[in-house]
Amino acid sequence: MQNVLLIFINILVTFSLVLLIEKIFKKEGLYVWAAIALIMANILECKTAGLFSGFTATCGNVLFASVFLATDIMNEKYGAEYSKKAIKLAVFAMVSFTIIMQIGLLFKPDATDMAHDAMKTLFGLNLRITISSVLLFYISNNLDIFLFERIKKKLPDKLWVRNNVATIISNVLENYFFIFFAFVGMYDIPTMLNIATTISAVEIVIALCDTPFLYVSKKLS
């Protein structure tokens, strides 16, 4: 029960920070958020937490979802071209972080070092998983931007429709493709489908929670 409460606290705090950084720094703040959220999400993705019986989420789920919120705010208020730029910036930041971290791990630790083993556990590179994560992040967020813009043209007065439809479709497709590309050969198909379905169910709930924050962002314009 504690983890269920914490995930909603996490949603409230994380999505509120998105609104705050946009309020203070406008679209430039959302650029920064997309970059730091992607890096933090990939770190917190290493930790999993049980929610209900049979439902497990990673601690990076909400941060990943916050990038969708950030790009939807940017798409709604500034235009799709700025959302696409934010995703490119986030991918550049993540790739840069990964490269620099791998160089840092190559240094032979001193006898007084206390961090190397822990850092190696967290940041040791699994090339296939890393490439799958970054590639699917880029594709899914651009799909979200595309769907959001298309639905906006057809239903300009239905903000909640374009927000939820675009985010949920993009999120779910990202989960299934990522699990397949990252873990094929490591798990059987039923196991991969079970993992992807569980993660998708959690992320659908998170995606539905971001809609009020998008409306608040418009009110704060």
Image (cartoon, rainbow, N blue to C red):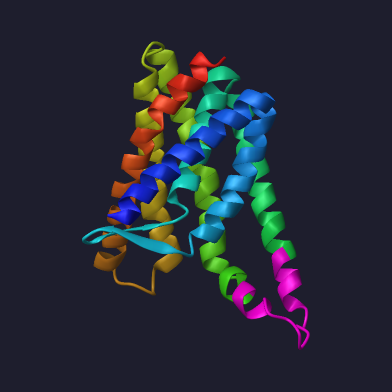
Position above or below: 156 against 50: above
Q: Quadrant of the N terminus?
A: bottom left
Q: Is residue 165 rendered to the left or right of residue 178?
A: left
Q: Quadrant of the C terminus?
A: top right
Total residue callouts: 0
Work out whether residue 76 or residue 56 is closer to the camera in this orientation and state it.
56
Visible residue check, residue 4: yes
Position above or below: 84 against 152: below
In the orientation shown, which residue stands out farthest toward the bottom?
Answer: 111
- Residue 5: % across, % down: 33, 48
Q: Is residue 101 rendered to the left or right of residue 184?
A: right
Q: Going 63% across and 80% down the picture, which residue do you hit?
A: 117
Visible residue check, residue 85: no
Q: Going 62% across and 33% down the picture, which residue do you hit?
A: 30
Q: Going 46% across and 21% down the picture, which residue do you hit?
A: 216
- Residue 186: % across, % down: 38, 74
The part of the chain drawn in magenta is: 101-119
In the orientation shown, which residue stands out farthest toward the front?
Answer: 2
- Residue 114: % across, % down: 68, 80
Q: Is residue 190 magenta?
A: no
Q: Going 63% across and 27% down the picture, which residue do you hit?
A: 82
